[in-house]
Image (cartoon, rainbow, N blue to C red):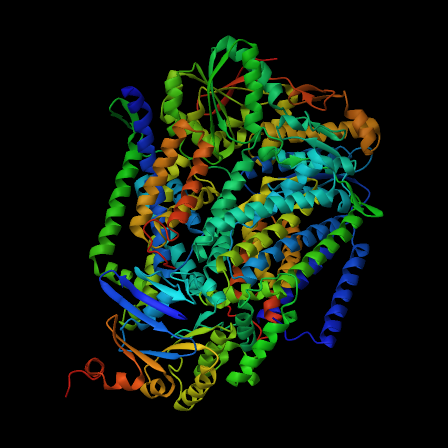
């Protein structure tokens, strides 16, 4: 019986190994997403938004006469799987462009591979500054915000309206660290002062143990930089210990992103962030987008969903403009281009980073996003 | 200086105790199961997670926390009974590396199943007791003190059970020499199953107790299992007193160290303590030298 | 281990090796781009699984932190290629050097502990290494962002230079690397030192009375396994053009043990095949099934319960199998 | 002086397992150590062969101190021992067991030449297997041998290191009378070549092979002398046969 099992295992893997679908004459959109692991929730919204965009384009007869087809791969928050899947999509599935996952280290590792095969990548979730900073390359664009896009205007606004003394608390890995550097730079430029920092390990449960130090420092503003489960625990314990009474609460947008805003409930009320999109924006395109999204997925779209939707649409616009899916033509079409979408008009900067309109937003009455004013 | 003591040190010490108690819950189950059945259960943290999720599910049906707790613990016990009967029974007497591997795979299966059933987003649990209390001037939530209280009662109960009851004597007998105990008529398989189910239920209990503080998500077990293992090894595998002492030690070290040094280094400190203990006493602080 | 190697026996094994090598050399011509990439990755990982077999299969030492050496080897190669000097050879030497020191340190310190204590101690050391590199944010190692953009240099073999950027070239280099590692390990395992290791696996208490220093032998075996794991990690980084903390994670330590077990420990070739099967299996499953961790977890359970001696263990000669558990 | 033990003491908590034991040994002689169970015989062996260090006293071998020296170094100096409970490599073949022991003499640790290339240990192993009559079981797994054959293998592994002093711990335990007779012949063959110390219960065996007998009781040396003297010694009779009938 055991030998039978072993032989069966080998046969199954061989058969599956050989069976690989070949792409017909159509535009293939490769979408690699962290569908298992800590970012599963927001990754699901990424895939939903990409599918929605592709369906809408196909209803309008596709692009340059070709229908679009999406191939989704799960990179499971793993760098080696992400690069492996990218190679599979490019070499095997012959995709025309790729939407990479949310893990910054995966995107950074995928960029040289995409360059080698000269395949366009539109980053819609990862926030690391390096992607359009030191490590940027010809084929990688980003229509999502990086730390600076929101950090610069937010710092200016906060120093004016909230106060001068800041205490930063964040998760100790690359993305929060680089975002904190941006905030520190712009806060100091505007005459504010960082009076303390605490970096907690990923997956920390008990933030209360840091509150003693924070209270002793008596900052005017507590700046929080983390995401996912850490953010939920941190916000709930900040509320439990009443920190909000002694100091103002501000954060990077990810702390209260749409995938965890329900988990916060009323705990997040009062926190001030700057972000480029919330579903309650009242531009006409946004009303249509939110209606369609709610109809399909029964949930308000997050900025991750909006960004992934716009990423596909922006590349489709470039394909129409360039009249082909050839990467070099697409790069030329995208550089300096502007895209008018639910979030307003955006211009692609020389560093392949989209310049986004940013709004100051406060969380109010039980986890609703309340737009205060335009920040940049 | 005094208010530094009260405002900073005192809450830290209390956090250390609460966190130490939670780890003790899990470490107790882990070490008794190992001590008795020589089973190294790497999936023990997943029962902690399942306990929290069961609590969340029950709460969505009957919104009373204090009903959800026993129901959740019962569900975890049934799951424990099921897994012990199907899988762990095949592991007895085998090389520990196979235990690590089977439970490693089992943990992956539990996490993935939880994500399929309940979805990946973090679920929120209301804190059942929202009151806070004045302790020498510093504010401290009552719910955490409640956990501390429950923890101490459970630990005392287990200590009493092991030390003074006939069931406890049987368990200790089987731990000493299972073949002899079997020869004396003690139903060893029954003891195995009940101890495994008890240890696993304890982890589930810790899971639901902590869910209002840490909330509920599929990978919460992984964050806990490494620390629990370190505690069990420092205390000496199979040694109940050792596991208790080590849980409080680790809880306090992490809580107090994170005042002065950065928390990430405090977390690594825990591993350094393990390495130093193992060099000084390879069988753990309380473990008998050359044991296992 | 084997009976006296008579001449006919030697010819037989030489023939078998030649056939396998020929088949492997021709294989890439039938594979498209992606499958070639996967094959290279599988072959590199097979050396990693074989290195574990040196300690687990032959010396009977269970280690649960073997990924630390794989990762450190990868980072060493990454640092060499990106910052120091773009040569694969120097990268391998640096990788071997760093992993040897790390393995000696961990081995020497933990050797007093036995069995499950040793396994958990190596897990703790590997976790410390993982956290140090994970938090090395503003150093060139890049912390959790990983060491990215590692160039792929030409491989200089005396007169001929091989362009490793072409996958097929890297494939043949990987096959050569795996075969040379296999031969070296086969030599070590068949050497006098190898028989001391099997003595330690069978009955550690008797070995000192025969005149061998058990502690020294175990640490040496641990260092040798570490070096080969380091080489495998170095080639992995050279091939993938990045080094990431994921290569240090304890999940990989667990996975490599399954690779060794599914292939059959104590056979060297078993773990190599196990690594290839798991790499292919995981890449296929993750494409066609959303809950692929569930299936991989189930595979761990099935291997432990139904195939404790693995594929090759099943086919190995009955009287030859060691004590099993 | 070839081998000397001076005032050796070793206690485990309250139990004084070895109490002030002293004796000297000339090269080539065969000494038997007898005494009731728990007299401290095996503990004496364990202290001499470095399993655990003595509380007090010294062990001298060929004029140099070997007190508390670890077993592997003792083996290089030419002291080898066998075990009361069979302690062989169950999973390896009979030939591999012996060859590993032969290899230990010079602690050949070479890594890169095939073990079968070691000419000298291979021949030595063949010779010992012949001496023990185990040649035909050469490739059997040691674990599958009969109890008696495993005891022979145990003796073989002790001789494999070509020692100059051999300590046998109840070599004939569990052997059939026929096998015991063969072992006595074997020891007679070894008498000239090597100095032997045997712990033994079988009185006929003791008187058949010993040049000298040392009697131990509760950790002390009761008597030490030629077989005839010891047989006549009153204290030995009292300890062995209880009070004088």
Does D100 appear above or below A239? below
Q: Position of residue A321 (x, y in %)?
A: 82, 26
Q: Position of residue C213 (x, y in %)?
A: 49, 60
Answer whether residue B73 is visible to the viewer in this image. Answer: no
Q: Report which quarter residue A306 is drawn in.
A: top right
Q: Report which quarter residue A366 is drawn in.
A: top left
Tell me what residue is drawn at x 51 percent, y 56 percent: C216
Does B117 appear above or below B37? above
Q: Work out which quarter of the rendered image holds the N terminus of chain C and state it.
A: bottom right
Residue lying furthest front: D1
Does B108 appear above or below A150? below
Name the residue nearer the viewer: C89 or A56. Answer: C89
Q: Position of residue D23 (x, y in %)?
A: 32, 71
State how many labels appear: 0
Q: Position of residue D49 (x, y in %)?
A: 40, 66
Q: Report which quarter residue A333 is drawn in.
A: top right
Answer whether residue B131 is visible to the viewer in this image. Answer: yes
Q: Is residue D98 left or right of residue B15?
A: right
Name the residue nearer the viewer: D132 or A100. Answer: D132
Tell me what residue is drawn at x 51 percent, y 11 percent: A192
Name the residue nearer the viewer: D144 or C309. Answer: D144
Tell me what residue is drawn at x 27 percent, y 47 percent: B155
Name the residue nearer the viewer: C223 or A374. Answer: C223
């Amino acid at each position: 019986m055991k030998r039978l099992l072993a032989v069966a295992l080998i046969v199954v893997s061989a058969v599956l190994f050989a069976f690989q679908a070949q792409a017909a004459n159509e535009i293939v959109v490769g979408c690699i997403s962290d569908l298992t692991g800590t970012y599963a929730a927001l990754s699901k919204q990424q895939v939903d938004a990409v599918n929605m965009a592709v369906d809408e384009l196909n209803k309008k007869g596709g692009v340059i006469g070709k229908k679009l087809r999406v191939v989704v791969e799960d990179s499971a928050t793993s760098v080696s799987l992400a690069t492996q899947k990218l190679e599979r999509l490019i070499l095997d599935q012959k995709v025309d462009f790729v939407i990479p996952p949310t893990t910054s280290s995966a995107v950074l590792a995928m960029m040289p591979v995409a360059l080698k095969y000269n395949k366009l990548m539109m980053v819609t979730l990862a926030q690391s500054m390096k992607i359009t900073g030191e490590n940027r390359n010809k084929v990688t664009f980003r229509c999502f915000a990086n730390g600076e896009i929101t950090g610069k205007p937010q710092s200016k606004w906060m120093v004016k309206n909230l106060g001068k003394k800041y205490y930063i608390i964040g998760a100790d890995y690359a993305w929060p660290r680089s975002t904190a550097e941006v905030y520190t730079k712009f806060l100091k430029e505007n005459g504010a002062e960082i009076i303390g920092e605490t970096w907690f390990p990923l997956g920390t449960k008990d933030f209360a143990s840091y509150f003693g130090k924070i209270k002793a420092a008596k900052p005017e503003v507590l700046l929080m930089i983390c995401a996912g489960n850490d953010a939920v625990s941190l916000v709930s314990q900040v509320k439990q210990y009443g920190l909000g009474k002694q100091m103002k609460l501000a954060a990077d947008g990810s702390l209260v992103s749409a995938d965890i805003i329900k988990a916060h409930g009323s705990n997040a009320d009062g926190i001030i962030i700057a972000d480029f999109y919330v579903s309650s924006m009242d531009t006409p395109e946004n009303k249509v987008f939110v209606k369609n999204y709610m109809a399909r997925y029964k949930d308000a779209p997050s900025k991750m969903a909006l960004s992934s939707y716009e990423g596909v649409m922006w590349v489709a616009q470039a394909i129409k403009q360039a009249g082909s899916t050839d990467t070099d033509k697409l790069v030329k079409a995208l550089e300096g281009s502007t895209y008018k979408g639910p979030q307003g008009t955006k211009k692609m900067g020389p560093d392949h980073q989209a310049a986004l309109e940013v709004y100051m937003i406060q969380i109010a009455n039980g986890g609703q996003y309340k737009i205060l004013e335009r920040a940049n | 200086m005094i208010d530094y003591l009260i405002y900073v040190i005192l809450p830290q010490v209390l956090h250390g105790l609460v966190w130490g108690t939670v780890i003790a819950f899990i470490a107790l189950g882990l070490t008794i199961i190992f001590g008795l059945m020589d089973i190294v259960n790497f999936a023990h943290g997943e029962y902690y997670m399942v306990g929290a999720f069961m609590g969340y599910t029950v709460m969505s049906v009957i919104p009373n926390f204090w009903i959800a707790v026993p129901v959740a613990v019962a569900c975890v016990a049934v799951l424990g009974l099921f897994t012990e009967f199907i899988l762990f029974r095949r592991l007895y007497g085998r090389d520990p590396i196979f235990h690590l591997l089977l439970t490693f795979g089992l943990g992956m299966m539990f996490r993935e199943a939880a994500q399929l059933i309940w979805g990946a987003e973090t679920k929120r649990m209301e804190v059942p007791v929202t009151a806070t209390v004045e302790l020498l001037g510093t504010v401290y939530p009552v719910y955490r003190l409640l956990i501390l209280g429950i923890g101490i009662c459970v630990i005392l109960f287990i200590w009493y059970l092991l030390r003074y009851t006939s069931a406890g004597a049987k368990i200790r007998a089987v731990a000493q020499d299972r073949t002899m105990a079997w020869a004396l008529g003690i139903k060893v398989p029954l003891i195995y199953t009940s101890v495994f189910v008890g240890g696993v239920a304890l982890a589930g209990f810790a899971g639901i107790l902590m869910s209002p503080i840490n909330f509920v998500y599929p990978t919460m077990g992984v964050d806990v299992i490494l620390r629990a293992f370190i505690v069990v090894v420092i205390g000496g595998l199979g040694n109940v007193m050792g596991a208790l002492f080590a849980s409080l030690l680790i809880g306090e070290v992490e809580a107090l160290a994170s005042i002065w040094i950065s928390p990430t280094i405090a977390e690594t400190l825990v591993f350094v303590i393990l390495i130093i203990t193992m060099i000084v006493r390879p069988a753990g602080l309380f473990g008998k030298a050359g044991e296992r | 281990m084997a009976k006296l190697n008579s001449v006919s026996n030697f010819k037989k094994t030489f023939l078998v090796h030649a056939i396998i090598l020929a088949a492997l050399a021709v294989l890439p011509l039938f594979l498209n781009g992606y499958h070639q990439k996967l094959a290279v990755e599988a072959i590199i990982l097979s050396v990693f699984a074989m290195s574990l077999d040196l300690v687990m299969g032959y010396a009977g030492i269970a280690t649960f932190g073997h990924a630390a050496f794989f990762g450190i080897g990868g980072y060493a190669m990454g640092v060499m290629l990106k910052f120091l000097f773009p040569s694969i050879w120097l990268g391998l030497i640096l990788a071997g050097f760093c992993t040897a020191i790390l393995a000696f340190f961990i081995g020497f310190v933990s050797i007093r502990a036995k069995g499950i204590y040793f396994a958990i101690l190596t897990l703790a050391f590997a976790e410390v290494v993982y956290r140090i590199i994970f938090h090395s944010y503003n150093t060139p190692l890049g912390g959790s962002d990983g060491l990215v953009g590692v160039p792929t240099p030409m491989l200089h073999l005396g007169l001929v230079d091989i362009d490793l950027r072409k996958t097929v070239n890297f494939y043949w280099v990987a096959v050569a690397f795996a075969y040379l590692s296999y031969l070296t390990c086969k030599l070590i395992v068949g050497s006098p030192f190898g028989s001391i290791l099997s003595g330690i696996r069978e009955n550690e208490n008797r070995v000192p009375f025969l005149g061998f220093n058990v502690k020294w032998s175990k640490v040496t075996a641990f260092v040798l396994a570490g070096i080969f794991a380091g080489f495998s990690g170095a080639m992995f980084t050279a091939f993938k053009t990045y080094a990431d903390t994921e290569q240090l994670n304890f999940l990989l330590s667990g996975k490599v043990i399954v690779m060794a077990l599914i292939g059959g420990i104590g056979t060297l070739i078993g773990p190599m095949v196990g690594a290839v099967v798991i790499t292919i299996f995981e890449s296929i499953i993750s494409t066609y099934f959303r809950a692929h961790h569930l299936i991989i977890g189930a595979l761990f359970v099935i291997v432990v319960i139904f195939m404790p001696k693995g594929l090759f263990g099943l086919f190995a000669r009955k009287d030859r199998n060691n004590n099993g558990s | 002086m070839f081998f000397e033990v001076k005032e050796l003491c070793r206690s485990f908590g309250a139990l004084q397992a070895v109490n002030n034991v002293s004796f000297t040994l000339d090269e080539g002689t065969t000494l038997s150590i007898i005494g009731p169970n728990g007299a401290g015989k095996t503990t004496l062996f364990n202290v001499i062969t470095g399993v655990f260090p003595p509380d007090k006293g010294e062990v001298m071998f060929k004029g140099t101190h070997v007190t508390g020296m670890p077993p592997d170094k003792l083996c290089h100096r030419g002291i080898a021992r066998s075990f009361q409970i069979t302690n062989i490599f169950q999973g390896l073949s009979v030939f591999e067991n012996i060859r590993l022991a032969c290899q230990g003499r010079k602690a050949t640790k070479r890594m890169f030449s095939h073990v079968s290339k070691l000419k000298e240990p291979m021949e030595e192993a063949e010779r010992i297997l012949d001496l023990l009559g185990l040649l035909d079981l050469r490739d059997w797994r040691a674990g599958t041998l009969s109890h008696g054959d495993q005891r022979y293998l145990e003796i073989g592994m002790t001789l494999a290191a070509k020692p100059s002093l051999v300590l046998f711990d109840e070599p004939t335990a569990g052997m059939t009378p026929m096998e015991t007779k063969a072992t006595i012949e074997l020891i007679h063959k070894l008498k000239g070549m090597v100095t032997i110390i045997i712990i033994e219960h079988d009185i006929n065996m003791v008187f058949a092979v010993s040049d000298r007998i040392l009697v131990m009781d509760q950790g002390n040396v009761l008597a030490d002398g030629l077989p005839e003297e010891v047989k006549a010694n009153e204290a030995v009779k009292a300890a062995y046969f209880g009070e004088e009938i």
